[in-house]
Image (cartoon, helix red, strand yellow):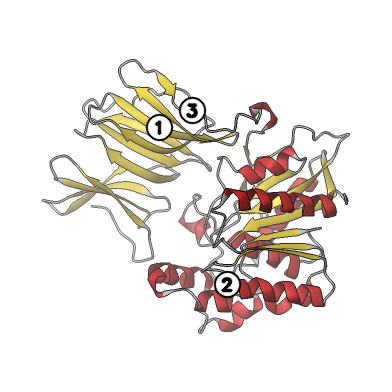
Amino acid sequence: MTELSEESAQYSASGFDKNDEHFYYITNAGREFKSLIAYNLETDQSSNLFETNWDVMYSYLSENDKYRVIGINEDGKNSLIIENTKTGEEVDLPDMENEDIVAVNISDSEELMRLTIGTAKAPNNLFVYNFSSGDLKKLTNTLNPDINPDDLVSAEVVRYESFDGLEIPAIYYKPHQATKDNKVPALVWVHGGPGGQSRVGYSALIQYLVNQGYAILAVNNRGSSGYGKTFFKMDDKKHGEEDLKDCIWGKKWLQEQEYIDSEKIGILGGSYGGYMTMAAMTFTPDEFEAGVNIFGVTNWLRTLKSIPPYWEAFREALYEKMGDPVKDSVALYNKSPLFHAEQVKNPVMVLQGANDPRVLQVESDEIVAALKENNVPVEYVVFEDEGHGFIKKENEIEGYRQIKQFLDKYLKEEE
């Protein structure tokens, strides 16, 4: 019988077996990482089918239960285990060491398997695997044919110690042109969330900026998912504090690299990462030379109060993570950059969707106005037909172009 803890836990369903004897689900209840559990519908007993020191991300059985698929979030990318349930043996797949296996689907005949695989150097592509022959065939090529893949860079998983000795994982991108004699500027990238994760996968913006000569360290600060329940809860109701220090110590790691211009390091991120960018520029104003806030929160009191009713489950989870805007109003006021904008010294860029239901435009309007009043260089870009993030490709291209121009101006000192 699986021992369940009374503390909060995450659950996701993984379906039934062919005979409807077992129900499968994934949970981290009573354990550090998410594991695959089998629940026997007749005996009312649960058993642990699979666990490791990483989170199980997804699992399912093929049409006739011949194969069990288990996807594992292994250090920022999904690895794959496929077990033949009849023999108990694992299927010997081709080497996919640097690939992120986003999704899997096995044909009803159980002879073929479709894989959705991404890498840092290419968007997701479809592959088909033949169980009999062991052949893996690529079906699509989604990278723009005008882009030379050799111009893109692979992602490297690195780790560094933060202010208190905690080991922080990060995804690192080093420009091809970076050398000891050709030092490049750098950026600390903060993922969305709170509780998100930077992963080894394709990011058009990251590859674009790295190609233009910016080293990027995508920090998985404490509070990020994928590294266990304890790590995930480390920044609960302490955002803009220790997690911000993790970003600053990421900057220090960048400064130790001999090919980085240690005086030209900025910070950028979207949504929660946009908040972290503004928190860095506000509460640690001397640390980063420039900041790019993409659809980011600057007033937690307004954001938490304005969550619509149809996001009730999300609201409860966010209150647990960030705080209640009534009960924790003082703490949320203190960590909201809007109310402390007079502390900002260095240039900031803000990108905002006019139809954003999470971060209302008035929020960005107010922080931009406050920065201008204090004579801080600020560039403000509003997309009238976007919400919380880019949907239209032309807006995305234009936004990325303006981000590059802003960074070139303040980190490369180009006009």
- Residue 235 placement, left or right of 344: left
Residues 310 and 29: in front is 310
User: Residue 361, can we see it?
Assistant: yes
Q: Residue at x 83, y 76 (%)?
A: 374
Q: Callout 3, which amino acid? A: Met
Q: Position of residue 293 (x, y in %)?
A: 68, 61
Report, in whole angstroms, how far the alpha carbon at label 3 lies from the one at label 1. Answer: 11 Å
Q: Do the numbered discs 3 and 2 sit on residues whose CB atoms are within 8 Å? A: no
Indicate left or right for 233 with 258 as reference: left
Earlier residue among tags 3 and 2: 3
Of the residues tagged 3 and 1, which is closer to the observer? Answer: 1
**Pointer 1 local density, CA inside 10 Å: few below 14, some 14–19, many at least 20:** many
Mark 2 highlights which residue? 360
Q: Residue at x 34, y 62 (%)?
A: 5
Residue 110, position as x, y percentages in the image:
25, 27
Viewer-closest of 242 and 415: 415
Which mark, by number, is residue 115? 1
Report helix, strand or loop for mark 1: strand
Residue 96 in the image: state x and y as whole percent: 48, 28
Name the side, left or right, on which 358 lies relative to 288: left
| SS at badge 2 | loop
**Amino acid type, residue under disc 1 in the picture:** Leu
Q: Is 300 situated above or below 189? A: below
Determine the residue positioned at 47% across, 52% down: 228
x then y, percent, for residue 363: 63, 74
Amino acid type of the residue tagged 2 in the rendering: Leu
Q: Which mark is residue 96?
A: 3
